[in-house]
Amino acid sequence: MLRLQRLLINDKFAATSFNLFDLGQIYLHFHLILRYHFTSLMVARKNCFCWSYFSGLQNVIHTCSVLDIFLNSVCFALTRGAVSRIKYAPLIRLFMDTKLRKSDQELIDQFFTLKTRSDVANLLEVRDATLIFLLYRNKENNYKEFQLPKKSGGFRIIRAPVSTIKILQRKLSYILYLVYNPKLSAHGFVQNKSIRTNADRHIKTPLILNIDLESFFDSITINRIIGLFMSKPYQLPKEAAVVLAQICCSPYGYLPQGAPTSPIVSNMICSRLDGALARLARLRKCEYTRYADDITFSSRIKKFASDIAQIDYIDGKIIITLGDVLLKIIENNGFRINQKKTKYRNSGTRQEVTGLVVNEKVNVKRKLMRQVRAMLYNYRIKQNDTDTEKSILLRKIEGKLNFIRSVRGSKDRAYLILANQYSAILGRPPHPIDDIQEIKFSTWFLEVSGKSNGTAFLMENKLITCEHVIREDVHIKACRWINGSKEEYEVAVVRKITGLDLAILDFKAGQSPQYAHSLSKGDSSKIIARQTLVVVGYPYYLDQREIIHYDVKVIAIKQEVYPRIVVDRELYSGMSGGAAVNYKNEVIGVICVGGSDNNGALHLQGIVPINFLDQIK
């Protein structure tokens, strides 16, 4: 053998061990290719040989021919069965790029010119020998199988790909999303679409028909996928189509649930089904959508056409008979209907589409809201649970809250009430339940040398206030009350101009609050007489413990000392530095009450237009 020496020098990665027999088989192929011109990448340690690599491996692979040749040697030995496939399959993953290097347009062009297996390997940026090993020699080890319980009872079998085949599938999935144009009726696994957009199409409809496709992924076989890639608009040769299908399918010959390629391939297969059912819906004045295996028809009239469904009432029970045309379209596209999950709902009942209520608006079920309230209550009263149990419960609550927010919106009052209970458990500030609360949460009171001295607000990640509030800037703190406790942070003056009575502050290093809302800047040049504004601040008479807000109307813009927006109501002492906002919650001006210049001249109280802030930045 050649003298063995180490080429890669970083030891922080664990080495992969080779026994002598496997090393001999790999060395044989390596030796034939190198012709004694290079040394190997293995180092002798006692009775085993170790191979290590460093963090810059991905770049080295493309610059070091030794690594390329060595990996090819390993692949050849693996594909010919010379060494253990199970033990050394992870070795392949170490050399596989997880991301594609080509541009999107290059990937699209290359996809439509695929002809052979080697072309597919080049498209996915892997070696042909690696592709052979993963698809043919190691296919029985490409998936891990486990079960998940179904809501309806029983278990759903999930076949998740191992890391090597998953890398290939993720790359192929990315390319397929580039070449596939989804139908408007498809909402599952489509960018910027969700169960929410799927349900939106069926709001306030008199009739809704829900249909479920039975064994959805299992019914998409490898032969169907081969036919998909060979037909329009892809029209790939059979060899390339077969290889693509083999990457997508499990060893059992159908789409596995859990593979990155399964969602996009299922949509591509269903493209013809979506087109046919959408045409049927238009002819019969219905709306059609599909989310994965959930098909929904809704009708604006009070009866479905017989082509779609016939609804009968026998002994108080609803009998649903699907139309022959509908059944034929579904069966001709290779699917079967799960009759047990076929449901009909009229406007007098709770209408659901993909688990969301659509009678008046898209909403979650009341049961879910009650469940989250109960979980929050249980967390507060259970004192003897372990930290692990509490952590699991919090993750479940967070997941359900995120789902509620995705459906009802981040500013929904019912969601915010639950979210604030969750925030209180974690010790976080509450979410503003309305726009005024958001403005209040952005407003702080200032303490100068330990005494309350005025108000400030956060805008564009800086605190804005009046210059006269912090004129004696010996020691300034920005304070607020959160959940009954006082928060205070040291701040420093960034810039101030006495003539305008404006100042910009910033939190000192290490003093930034963890949770803070920042207001948006408006355009004060558009202010007109009798326009309504909202003023917010901490008045002295409430001892800085309570923030107030109220409406004011613009009377005029005075130019006596410098511009001031004059309003029809009193602005209280202590509110200086607070924000005046318009109906869009944009800051229009800074409240100024009784400020004076360096000569002691008293200024007219009012609101400093926010546009003057640009002069001191």
Image: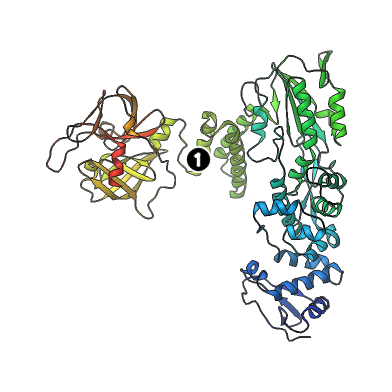
Quarter of the image for residue 224 reads top right
Image x and y of residue 143, in percent = 80, 54
Image x and y of residue 343, in percent = 78, 24
Q: Is residue 546 visible?
A: no
Residue 431 vs residue 266, the one in the foreground: 266
Q: The N terminus lies in which quarter of the figure? A: bottom right
Image x and y of residue 506, in percent = 34, 49
* Amino acid type shown at disc 1: Ser
| Residue behind mark 1 | 423
Image x and y of residue 602, in percent = 15, 35
At 32% across and 45% down in the image, what residue appears?
A: 478
Element under label 1? helix
At 77% across and 27% down in the image, what residue appears?
A: 279
Residue 604 vs residue 403, the one in the foreground: 604
At 25% across and 34% down in the image, what residue appears?
A: 540
Specify whether 495 is left or right of 130: left
Instruction: Say above or below: 429 vs 511.
Output: above
Q: Is residue 131 visible?
A: yes
Q: Residues within 10 Å of mark 1 (few under 14, many from 20)?
A: some
Indicate the colouring scheme: rainbow
